[in-house]
Image (spheres, coloured by chain):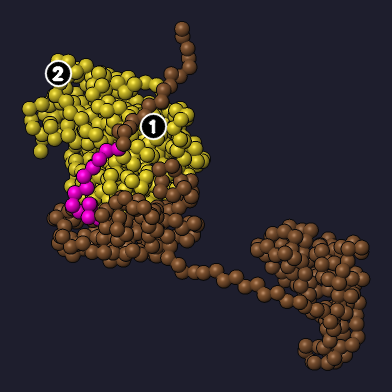
Amino acid sequence: MRDVAIVAFAQTRHTGHDSGLSEPELILPVIEEVKERTGLRRFGFTCSGSCDYLAGAPFSFVSALDALGAWPPISESHVEMDGAWALYEAWVRLQHGDVDTALVYGFGKSSLGDLRSVMTLQLDPYYLAPLGLDQVSFAALQAAAVRADRAELDAIVRRSRAAGRDNPYALDLPDELTDDVGVAPSRASDVAPSRASDIEPLRASDVAPITDGAAAVVLAAGDAVAELCARPAHIRGIAHRIEPHYLGMRDLARSVSAADAARAAGVGKGPVEVAELHTQFAHEEIILRRALELPADTVVNPSGGPLAANPVMAAGLIRIGEAARRIHDGTASRTVGHAAGGPCLQHNLVTVLEA
Amino acid sequence: METSEPLVARHVLEFPGGYTRSTGPVIGRFLTELRAGRIVGVRTAEGRVLVPPLEYDPATGDPVTDDYVEVGPAGTVTASAWVQEPRPEHPLDRPFAWALIRLDGADTALVHAVDAGDPKELRPGTRVRPVWRERREGGITDIACFRPEVTMIVSPVRPEYRIQAGGALRTFLEGVRRGVFLGGRCPGCAKVYVPFRASCPECGSRIAEQVELPDTGTITTFAINNLPDPRAPEVPFVSAYILLDGADIPMIALVGGVPAHEVRQGMRVRAEWVPESERTLSMANVRWFTPTGEEDAELS
């Protein structure tokens, strides 16, 4: 395998409401930031992750290219997934050996619509979508299968929020666990408000907050790695695995695909100082800790994780970026970044980063 | 003209009439059977029964067989989530549960709604049965929802009686109408019983001697009741054994005028009588016993 490293990472100061910026306007500052940090103006490959259903605009990722300056034409691709999978595609692209740098970005504004029912659109159209099974409902089924302890869930949320308050990019969410998050305050008044408190055993605070934001990562290979970053975060392992889509075909209390991806990425081959997990619901941390077999001394989501800021389609990429940042700044030498997609952690991607 | 007002517009993404999707042979078979009021699974090459059927076995990736098996209609809940406030797109407009249901004969679970009425009615292991929609179209919502199997019925019991206080009880109640607790002293063992009774339950002697007891006494034991009772003014209420001064046997009465958690054994209490004009031949003449404020008595 060709050694590929994360040499730069930038993210927006995420907002819990729609600031009115268009998607290109949201992306532009993070693209500029990684360009400035690496000194690169052009990249061998560019790949992004986003979801048109968030903005309700077909091919919205195409107009997002306006933030790049894609002329003369660039080599570019897109995944209708979290930006973490764009990073995976860029990593694969760099394995070809003919290009040495890649720009990866992910972005999403979940404040515009009703995320719970937007997420219904990812379900199979025969068996699940016609039931109107929304995102919080299927997550609650998984939480019921896990039979998690309420005190443990609340502790996960409090710890995540406290870390988020220390993270200038995350939202400022209170220590007190009330039922008022998960609602975008600036939501257009004709869209029904979305309260999560009505699906037991979840409570509203278990649900990641509605968030708008973007993130960008630069990957490098070969000589470019040392040229672009003083302390690069080398991708020592990266793998993703997927499970059957239909919820009744799986044991929802476990994540077999996350465990398989972690094994393939080599998580257990060394100590893990920091793990950034894509936990959009508190109980997912319990499932993922077990699946990744993280030891008790691994610090989970020191950024606050998605429970402190969840820009959908960027949040997984941000987990990898945050894991890389700990290596860039010298506070860790071996970290793990995780991203998830699909209902109830159907699809999991795990990266192992080393100094 | 400059304005600081947010410029907000409504935007709806819709494919008018909805997408048409081909079902393929496997899902099509399942939906056709549903329309006919049957639930079928498909057998995999390994012999497992997938419900709802998929074209490929998720465990192996192999195509499934042509063997369709009728399952259910009853099944067992493996996990559930309670929806207190249904959303417009949900299948029920009243509180319900989402559930994973393993139908009898299936090796996988079906996701559907359960109309359980109350979250307590549903737990892993609860047996449920489908409620079919009257007009079925060949969709997963041809099953309107599931309902728990019948495990319990309600049997009302309400015979009526006419009871009459004659004898000793009448004697006691006539005392209560006057504002006096009447006891009786056993000529054999000298124990004083209240309410007044015709014979001593210990030695069997006939009791003739009436004793007027004071309306003060001591709580020997008590219970805090959290179920409403027509004889009690509110919930929770305290019913107590009260040993009237001079009696050997306590009698049961309500305790009031004090928070339930402050009631204790040894507490001194006095009867609170209803006004004389309202008194009848009934224990209702005593509203309840209420603390006197005296120091607690030693209980032997």
The residue at 90%/82% (across/down) is: B210
Label 2 chain ID = A
Left or right: residue A44 versus residue B295 is: left
Displayed quadrant of residue B44: bottom left
Report the chain shown in brown: B
Element type at mark 2? loop
The residue at 24%/60% (across/down) is: B41
The residue at 19%/23% (across/down) is: A228
- A339 in magenta: no
Which residue bears the numbered disc 2? A73
Q: What crowding class fits label 2: few (fewer than 14 Cα within 10 Å), some (14-19), or many (20 or more)?
A: few
Q: Inspect the image, locate mark 1, and give the three-letter code of the amino acid beneath it.
A: Gly
Q: Which mark is residue B131?
A: none
Displayed quadrant of residue B108: bottom left
Q: Position of residue B15 (x, y in %)?
A: 30, 33
Along the polypeptide, which appears first: circle 1 or circle 2?
2
Region in magenta: B18-30
* Along the viewing direction, whichever of A302 and B292 lies nearer the viewer: B292
Left or right: residue B174 versus residue A109 is: right
Q: Which mark is residue A113?
A: 1
Q: Colour of chain A?
A: yellow
Displayed quadrant of residue B20: top left
Q: Quadrant of the C terminus of chain B?
A: bottom right
Q: Nearer the viewer, mark 1 or mark 2?
A: 1
Element type at mark 1? loop
The residue at 86%/79% (across/down) is: B170
